[in-house]
Image (cartoon, coloured by chain):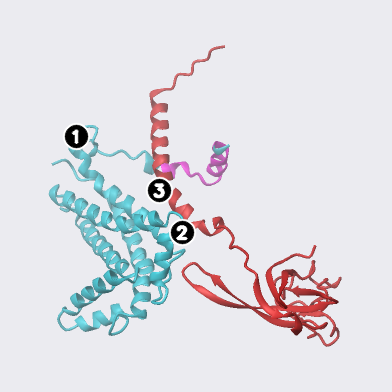
Chain colours: A cyan, B red
Amino acid sequence: MLQRIYDWIDDRIDVTPLWRDVADHEVPEHVNPGYHFSAFVYCFGGLTFFTVVIQILSGMFLTMYYVPDIVNAHASVEYLQTDVAFGMIVRGMHHWGASVVIVMVFLHTLRVFFTGSYKKPREINWVVGVLLFFIILGLGFTGYLLPWDMKAYFATQVGLEIAESVPVVGDLISNLLAGGEFIGAQTLTRFFAIHVFFLPGALLGLIAIHFIMIRKQGISGPL
Amino acid sequence: MEKNHNVSRRQFLTYALLGTGGFMAAGLIMPMVRFGVDPILQADAEEDMIDVAGVDELTDVPQAFDMEYEQDHGWHVEQVTETVWMFLDGEEVVALSPTCTHLGCTVSWGTDADNPEQFFCPCHFGRFERDGTNVPGTPPTEPLHRYDHDVRDGRVLLGNPSPQV
């Protein structure tokens, strides 16, 4: 049955080469843990992507209940956490996953650094990777405010003070981020928009570039 | 006819990987799906009878009464005011839902100049008789829903509206 559905589609739009290209792509021996156990360090990029996928999925589900409004934000988070089935688990995935992504990005970066994979011809990929790192930190920062509790408020307060410490344009950056001079309703909707639209959009675009480059250039050679 | 059921190493690996991968993917996806579909699996709220009006306020002519109750929106509780059309059919209290059975607009009594003794829906000109029966040839396909009711100490208490047929 499934085979016939697959064949019907494949007859028309020839999907086999598309997934074959991904699934049958061979990786070099030095990144295969079957040959060298230490090759596990080459998993961190994939693990980062995997946790990012979990973040996107769990985040999409959380928006079914979350409202970015100062009156209801905290109440809606409390509701989805305590009253909705598996709410604690789905929010837990998103909450803990946020830390896991940052840890994985960090380990991936260390691997790239210590294997010298940032050197010519892969400098552009390193730059894109650093941008991705900043975007992920931005996602962490903007996500922190959304539960609208005390921790959220003061974490954002600290973040905005750091932004203010930038010479000359500090106040402008802080006001732009907060949507005004204090943390309020405008800050919450802004952070929500940045967290679910702007940064994920940029993230997906840069991840695509990152992946196309790794396929074009291949994994760097053994040490 | 004993056939050879040996599983090749490649097949075994495929099954093992697909099985383990599927199990892990299900472990991730299942909580999220259950989380998302939670509203359709919630038990319906228990029916509370709501005090709407005194029997002595009712007449032979349908009048609109306000039915007030709290509606639970999950993280927000709203005070809802719903309109009910009530009248006396002899001794019997009749409480009709104002929701048109065509597509859900709201009907009023006697607002159609040509049919002053009927309920009228302005959206698609649906009409209903005084007892809620839909007028043939107009859009609604069934009579107005009737509230379950109870009379206690001269007060009318209403439950949920249910279809008349």
At label 3, the amino acid type is Leu
Q: Residues within 10 Å of mark 3 (few under 14, many from 20)?
A: some
Q: Secondary structure at mark 1?
A: loop
Q: Nearer the viewer, mark 3 or mark 1?
A: 3
Disc 2 residue type? Answer: Val
Q: Which residue is mark 3?
A: B28
Report the residue marked by disc 1: A36
Rendered residue at 78%/65% (across/down): B164
Q: CA distance from mark 1 to mark 2?
A: 46 Å
Disc 3: host chain? B
Q: Is residue B135 above or below residue A2?
A: below
Can you tell which mark lies on residue B25?
Answer: none
**Image height of A99 relative to A27, above or below:** below
In the rendered structure, the answer to whether residue B8 lies left or right of residue B135 reads left
Tell me the chief SS of the magenta region. helix
Frontmost residue, A56 versus A209:
A56
Asked if residue B38 is among those painted magenta in the image, a careful observer would answer: no
Question: Is residue A103 shown left or right of residue B154?
Answer: left
